Image (spheres, rainbow, N blue to C red):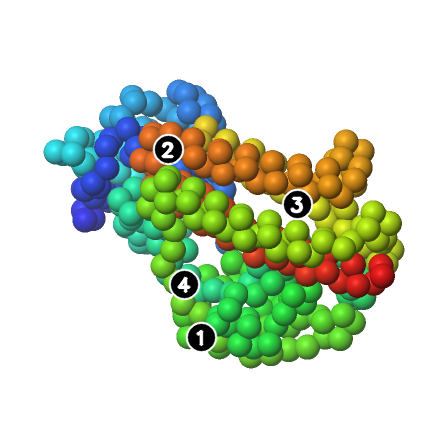
Amino acid sequence: MFTETLAQTFTFTRSVNAPSALVYRAFTNATALREWYADNAQVDARVEGALFLSWHIGYYVVGNFTALKPDEHVAFSWHGRGEPYATHVDVHLDKSGEGTQVTIRHSGIGEGEGWAQIAQQFRGEWESALENLQSVLETGLDLRLMRRPMLGIYPSLLDAATAERLSIPVKQGLLLDGVLDGLGAQAAGLQIHDVIVKVDGHSVTDWPSLQMVITPHKAGDVIAVEFYRGSQKQTVQMKLSGRPAPDVPATVEGLVERLTATQRTLDSELDSLLADVTETEAAYNPAPNEWNIKEVVAHLIWTERFNQMWIWGNIGGDDSIPWPDNNRAQLEPLLAVYPTMAELVAELKRAEAGTIAAVAHLPAAFMSRKSSYLRLAQAVTSSAEHSRQHFAQIKAAAQQAK
């Protein structure tokens, strides 16, 4: 509900079926803010501590906390990009049964031509933000994501070495690690190792730039996608897909059961691939700057270890652990400590077991953060696709080595 109490103050209220402690956290924790509000957030949650919020569209806000009363009150200054001067936001939390009444007062907003459009944006953005806050805390679903159409791709950043190996004549773009069955990218004919450089006429260099282009569209829209397959540039018309509801177990026990079954299948597939591969063949590099089989397995070990760090970060309330570009510093220590294929595979299976154990020990407090759990469960249950892409790489390397 929106009411205008004074010309310069806007007030928004919404009832959320969640404890006030979780709502308070949603305004004072960087990860929580990213889950429902900003695309990026940096938070120093103390009076006079800094607050920085930014969105992929180029808008950002800087401010400082002016009041913090756990589970009851959060206040901070607000100075957004292009706004004439700083305004102020007060968030009051009132317990209502088992839920929380959230009241946001955004004050100090100017009048006149310089403020008219900004004020209108404040009205619409706070209304939609509170709707999403309610969804994230009650169901775990981020409406910004659920309402956004998708291409149906597994993207990664293109680096110079990969561009050279694939004969791609550009240095920036989204490299496809694969496509999702039945969605727009697959239907349009895109495939693994294609590099997307333009979408809907706009250059795409990374994930945020893609999101800026996609956000204004809806499922069913048809857009032009320009990409490289090797040295050949192609353009296809792609129909944007709707986003399916997440399919993840609701409990830790269910998630562990699914991961264990998936990992058992993947281990069997890998054992079959390596059954007649010799040490010499496993160390054979198919081409310059292309991994041999041992290096691929080392990469999979490192990925499991990274997943565990990311899980620990999520549990601790900070998921801002960036994935570093693949480099020799990740692989060489593993290859030195586990020099044979048998040792590498054994360590990979131990690392996989470690990831499952990390999931098995998700604490109850974390499970109450529904959006955090949903994102974590989606990430760990989708990792099989990553493994199988590298299994295909192992198979190709083994065939070339023989």
Give the distance between the C-alpha atoms of the residues marked 4 and 3, in whole angstroms. Answer: 28 Å
Residue in the image at 45% along x and 28% along y: 316
Task: Rate crowding at label 2 as few (under 14), some (14 to 19) or many (20 or more) other CA atoms within 10 Å.
Answer: some
Give the distance between the C-alpha atoms of the residues marked 4 and 1, in whole angstroms. Answer: 13 Å
Tell me residue 31's x, y (percent): 45, 36
Q: Are marks 1 and 3 in contact (CB under 8 Å)?
A: no
Which residue is disc 2 drawn over?
Answer: 366
Decide if residue 223 is on the left or right side of residue 136.
right
In this view of the protein, can residue 83 be seen by the observer?
A: no
Task: Rate crowding at label 3 as few (under 14), some (14 to 19) or many (20 or more) other CA atoms within 10 Å.
Answer: many
Give the distance between the C-alpha atoms of the residues marked 1 and 2, in whole angstroms. Answer: 37 Å
Q: Are marks 4 and 2 in contact (CB under 8 Å)?
A: no
Give the mark toward the camera: 3 or 2.
3
- Vertical placement of residue 147 versus 100, above or below: below
Tell me residue 143's x, y (percent): 35, 54
Q: Are marks 4 and 1 in contact (CB under 8 Å)?
A: no
Which residue is disc 3 drawn over?
Answer: 300
Residue in the image at 73% along x and 49% along y: 296
Which residue is disc 4 drawn over?
Answer: 243
> Secondary structure under badge 3?
helix
Q: Nearer the viewer, residue 377 or 218?
A: 377
Give the mark toward the camera: 1 or 3.
3
Task: Rate crowding at label 1 as few (under 14), some (14 to 19) or many (20 or more) other CA atoms within 10 Å.
Answer: few
Q: Amino acid type of disc 3?
A: Leu
Tell me the tag on residue 248. Answer: none
Name the image quarter holding the C terminus: bottom right
Q: Amino acid type of disc 2?
A: Phe
First reached walking from the N terminus: tag 3 or tag 2: 3
Which residue is disc 1 drawn over?
Answer: 221
First reached walking from the N terminus: tag 4 or tag 2: 4
Q: Nearer the viewer, residue 361 or 77?
A: 361
